[in-house]
Structure formats: C-alpha cells, structure tokens
Image (cartoon, helix red, strand yellow):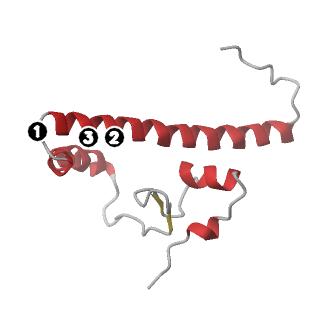
Amino acid sequence: MTTPDISRLSYAELVELNKQLEQQINAKRGEELKVLVDGFAKKLEAAGFSVTEGVEALKPYMASAGSTRKAGGGAAPVLYRDPANPANTWSGRGRAAGWLAAYEEQGRSRDEFKVSQS
C-alpha cells in the first residue's frame, strides 16, 4: 500500500481528511468486531455450546476489564439505536459510534436513530 503525500494539504483539508479517516476507522472497527463475534458464535455452536453459555463464560473477563472504572459510574443510557442491528447503540457520549457515523456519511440525520424516551 502506498501512502499518499499529505504534506501539501491545507489545515482545513487535513482536518476534513482526519474526520473522514475517523469515520472510516470506526466503520471498519465495527465490521471487524462483527466478523470476530460471528466466528465466535459459530465456534461455540460447532462445539455444542449456546451463544448464551459463551457470553456467561466471558463475564469474568468483562468484570476485570471494568474494574478500573470510577465508583458510581455505571453505563450511560442508550440514546441512539441502529434499526438494522439493534445491538448497535450509542449513548451520545464521546466520539459517534461507527455505525452512526457511516449513516451520517450517507447523508442521514442523527435524529432518525434517536431512541424515544418513555
């Protein structure tokens, strides 16, 4: 892969390129995670385990990963959900989720994916 020469780009062009790169990275990250999860699910089922059993077996890893979190934190409420894949959610905090950034890149509005508050 050849790396393009970006040294002649203006500041504004670099900022726009960076924005596009972040969106592409987020989208690819989501795709890669889906491939890994699909492979994990297939391996579990081939070995005679359910996906639920696999998730239960992962809980100790999830607990240790969250042990550095500040006390009293907790998960932020879901504000946005992907209608094509309801497992894709975003709390509205931090950088936009890859799936949402991809939709926005297609010209869709973030408001389309807002979860209605009951």
The quadrant of the rendering that contains the C terminus is bottom left
Residue 113 in which image quadrant? bottom right
Q: Amino acid at mark 3?
A: Ala
Q: Tell me the element at label 2.
A: helix
Marks 1 and 2 sit apart, C-alpha to C-alpha, by: 17 Å
Q: Residue at 50% of width from left, 63% of height from top?
A: 83
The quadrant of the rendering that contains the N terminus is top right
Marker count (numbered): 3
Task: Work out whether residue 15 or residue 108 is closer to the camera in this orientation and state it.
Answer: 108
Residue 23 picture location, percent across and down: 63, 44
Q: Amino acid at mark 1?
A: Gly
Where does label 1 land, which residue?
48
Q: Tell me the element at label 1.
A: loop
Tell me which label, 1 or 2, sits earlier in the chain.
2
Q: Amino acid at mark 2?
A: Val
Judge left or right: residue 18 versus residue 43.
Answer: right
Query: Mark 2, residues whose alpha carbon is within 10 Å: few (<14), some, or many (≥20)?
Result: few
Residue 3 in which image quadrant? top right
Where does label 2 land, which residue?
37
Where does label 3 land, which residue?
41
Asked if the residues shown at circle 1 and circle 2 are in contact, with their CB atoms under 8 angstroms apart, the answer is no
